[in-house]
Image (cartoon, helix red, strand yellow):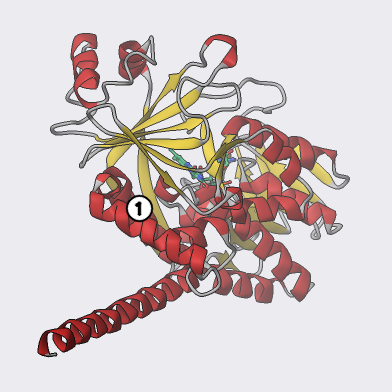
Amino acid sequence: MQDPGTVTIVGAGLAGPLLACSLAQAGRRVDLYEKRSDPRLRGPERGRSINLALSTRGIHALRRVGLADEVLRASALMRGRMIHHPDRSLTFQPYGNDDSQALRSVSRAGLNLLLVEAAARLPGVRLFFDRKCTGMDLASGTLEFAEGRIQAGFVVGADGVYSAVRSALQKQERFDYSQEYLGHGYRELTIPAGPGGAFPLEPGALHVWPRGAFMMIALPNSDGSFTCTLFWPFEGPNSFAALTNERDVLAYFELQFPDVPGLVPTLAHDFLHNPTGSLVTVRCRPWHHAGRVVLLGDACHAVVPFLGQGMNAAFEDCTVLADCLARHGANRTAAFVEYEARRKEHVDVLADLCIDNFLEMRDRVAARAFVLWKKLALLLHRAFPRWYVPLYVMIEFTLIPYADAVRRARRQDRAVRGVAFVLLLLLAAIVVGAFLR
Ligand code: FAD
């Protein structure tokens, strides 16, 4: 039986320990339960993405708990996309107009460790590792673990995309739930650092090899290495299933990604032995029940990783949930209702944007018209920074809620089209006038 004022968070991945820091700093007692072993005692695990793109929303949430500077110090700056064409040529597409509009590549394991250590330092936080939650009885508020049960006062399900806490909510009537898998999965490869820790590719960029129906990306690590992620179909042509021996793997990379075999000495072996992850979008509602349980991060809104926003949005959840709890005091139901109202519409829009950005990255980024449009958008942003902000810049480098950003982008694009139309009419009038004179 737990003190009713204690917050029990299930999941000490990325969002769980950040929320623990935020609530403990506000004077609450927090118990954090995690199924994996203590990251302070073990090395990094394989199977999840090795590094992540951190942007303004995530940095803002980290700053609120005093951790942003430490995280940024260990990060690598990415100022834009470096496109690798099949003929080995490169083109650079900046994300914004200066370094305030750049992404940060951070190590997932390093960030998890830093957050867990920060939570552990705070009075009022207790951490329990190797504790897998197997279910929850919503009527009594009892959390179930292999080791026994806990009568919890208030539970936060921060246990990721396959959340056990959400599963308990799913058994309730009128709970909406959908999950949608992409036909593509992901597999990771590592480009090791060069001699003396030198970066073998341009360090200040997110590298993209767009190939139409599939692609590869690479993010820099602060030790000079790069983590590549292949986003390929599971089956069919150009798929993971199509390559089953080392000779075929090397021949395929020589054809599609000719600059890569020279950078990854263990390419064929790693390709054939590294695990393949799946990519899923999860939506559900409501995110809370009876003022006793609430969901956070991937547990309520997993998105595919093509905008690098899943963690950033989960961190934003932490800030909003902590604010709502502070505002509503003992009335947790009101806090949860406000939290969901402030987040749901926006993360639903984010889910669609992420899928759209997959099409952009694997396909459109290499097209001349796309490059021209991006250049024009940044020119407009530089000339009229308050009036015109490209959608990508709003998503990655501002705190404008996602759905508001999309609405604003549509208004801006209508205005640009209107101005272009008027300019064309004027030009036509001048040409006709000159001809008639
Ligand atoms: P998680 O980080 O998944 O944490 C959940 C925790 O709960 C885990 O520690 C897990 O072990 C624990 N847990 C699970 N079940 C139980 C249980 N039953 N009992 C106890 N503990 C449990 N986002 C970005 O912002 N930028 C990126 O560049 C980016 N790249 C990505 C690349 C890939 C390939 C993928 C798959 C995702 C990427 N994401 C990225 C998304 C990001 O990883 C997630 O959105 C983020 O991890 C969500 O945080 P979370 O705390 O909600 O869940």
- Residue 364 seen from this side: yes
Quadrant housing residue 120: top right
Please state if 378 lies on the left or on the right of 209 as rendered. right
Q: Residue furthest left?
A: 436
Check the picture and name the quadrant holding the C terminus: bottom left
Q: Please name the residue that numbered disc 1 is placed on.
A: 357
- Residue 136 seen from this side: no
Residue 362: give x, y in percent of width and height.
28, 43
SS class, disc 1 = helix
Q: Please tell me which residue is depicted at 69% across the width and 32% down the height of the picture.
A: 113
Q: Nearer the viewer, residue 7 or 318?
A: 318
Please state if 366 lies on the left or on the right of 205 as rendered. left
Q: Residue furthest front?
A: 437
Tally of numbered tags: 1
Q: Is residue 19 above or below residue 188?
A: below
Would you call the spot at circle 1 few (<14 residues within 10 Å), some (14-19), or many (20 or more)? some
Residue 284: give x, y in percent of width and height.
44, 63
Q: Is residue 219 above or below residue 358?
A: above
Residue 434: give x, y in percent of width and height.
17, 85
| Mark 1 lies within 8 Å of ligand 1 (Cβ measured) | no
Residue 220: give x, y in percent of width and height.
51, 30
Q: Please tell me which residue is depicted at 69% across the width and 45% down the height of the picture.
A: 17
Instruction: Identify the amino acid type marked 1.
Output: Asn
Q: Nearer the viewer, residue 213 or 196?
A: 196
